[in-house]
Amino acid sequence: DSDELIEIQNYATANKASINEDMFGKYEGRNVIFVSMESLQSFVINEEMNGHVVTPFLNSLTQDQDTYYFSDFYHQTGLGKTSDSEFIVENGFLGSGNGAAFFTNGENTYTSLSQRLGENGYYTSVMHANNKSFWNRDRMYQSLNIDHFYDVDAYTIGEGQSVSWGMKDIPFFEQSAQILGQVEQPFATRLITLTNHHPFELEEQDKLIPEYDSNSGTLNRYFQTVRYMDESLKVFFEQLKANGVYDNSIIVMYGDHYGISELHHKAMAQYLGKEQLTAYDHALLQSVPMFIHIPGSNDGKEIATTSGQMDLRPTILHLLGISTASDVEFGNDLFSEEHPNFVPFRDGRVVTSDYVYTQDVCYDRATGEETTIDVCAPAMERAASVMHYSDQIISMDLLRFFEQNYETSHQKE
Ligand code: GP9
Ligand code: MN
């Protein structure tokens, strides 16, 4: 046993929001389809670029009767980019502060979302048309107890179906849906898109809107590749409906991390119609869209809870009726009345419903103006604990102790 783990487990348990009784287990037995939307940020949602709608399909979901749209949701990734977002969603705590945990700690023991789903009868997988060793995924997915990785070898990339980093999103979703129509149910999977990745390149026939007109080619092309990805998501939904998987599934979609870095601040300011961007603006620009689409739920709405990728693990497990009460995780159920409206970023920044803490300054979100640091202090302290404990779990491989206890207690039952 480990004293460090006991302390962390106590902290995690003491900071867990209560469950929402009405939502817990409401969708027990449904398949879960996560879609990691490459580099997608919230600033394009329900907006136009020079008169062109950028995300028509996702915009329709923000108004959809079967979709919960989370409009103040943030990525929490660091240097590990896509892999960090996977790490956070799987584990419910932050990735490493000085590298990609997928590389540095790919052989640790984890109590992942996929593992919990597997214990509850789910067939778990990841679908991503890239080489299996990119981000050390092949090794890490074993540690996360993911049953199968549909990597590039699971796909047939025909003439004209590849651009830039690899397989285009539309054929990727078409072939993925075909596979999902055949695997045993219930399944849980994560599809990772690729086309909307820097340097944001497309072939002519896939450009559905023109480029933007700033001095940043990166931002200019970004709108086009986002528009293409949006189209691919629409195709995916159609395919899932056609093969019968749709009705018995929950589809969770989230942006993995920012696509436009602070290097492009001038062009971003132009697009947003601002003179210049401040540290406060840059923090809020880390918002990524998140949707929980539940066919037949008929309860869809916008939810403005201030939340982040860490919150997905408990939220989804609870919808399926799987308890996380004893799990070491720091996210909170997004349907809980007690959600803390708090997001720690991996670099020390903190966003709450009321405040933003960045670069040693505390801002009031009601005015966007600087305010006294005291009002940010409780959130800063909480963020420091989450960062510190996440680092400890990773660097000392602490969940190997948790897993021993968990297995013993389950054998006794
Ligand atoms: C690569 C894809 C992109 O497989 O996940 O990785 P990123 O550069 O966004 O971390
Ligand atoms: Mn990515």
Image: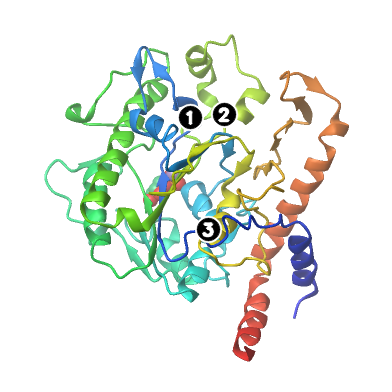
Residue to which mark 1 is pinned? 260
Residue to which mark 3 is pinned? 319
The local crowd at label 1, few if under 14, some if 14 to 19, many if 20 or more residues have their Cα within 10 Å, is some
For the N terminus, the image quarter is bottom right
The label nearer to you, 2 versus 3, is 3
The local crowd at label 3, few if under 14, some if 14 to 19, many if 20 or more residues have their Cα within 10 Å, is many
The local crowd at label 2, few if under 14, some if 14 to 19, many if 20 or more residues have their Cα within 10 Å, is some
- Does the rendering let one see residue 127? no
For the C terminus, the image quarter is bottom right
- Assess whether mark 1 and mark 2 are in contact (beta carbons under 8 angstroms): yes
Quadrant where ligand 2 appears: top left
The kind of residue on which mark 1 rests is: Ile
Q: Secondary structure at mark 3?
A: helix
Reply above or below: 207 against 186. Answer: above
Q: CA distance from mark 2 to mark 1?
A: 9 Å
Q: CA distance from mark 3 to mark 1?
A: 33 Å
Label ID, residue 285:
2
Question: Is residue 85 found left or right of 37 in the rendered image?
Answer: right
Q: Secondary structure at mark 2?
A: loop
Q: Secondary structure at mark 1?
A: loop
Residue pictured at 65% horizontal, 70% vertical:
397
- Asked where in the image residue 213 lies, by quadrant, the reply is top left
Counting residues from the N terminus, which is met first, the one under dot 3 or under dot 1?
Answer: 1
Residue 32 at x, y percent in the picture: 41, 58
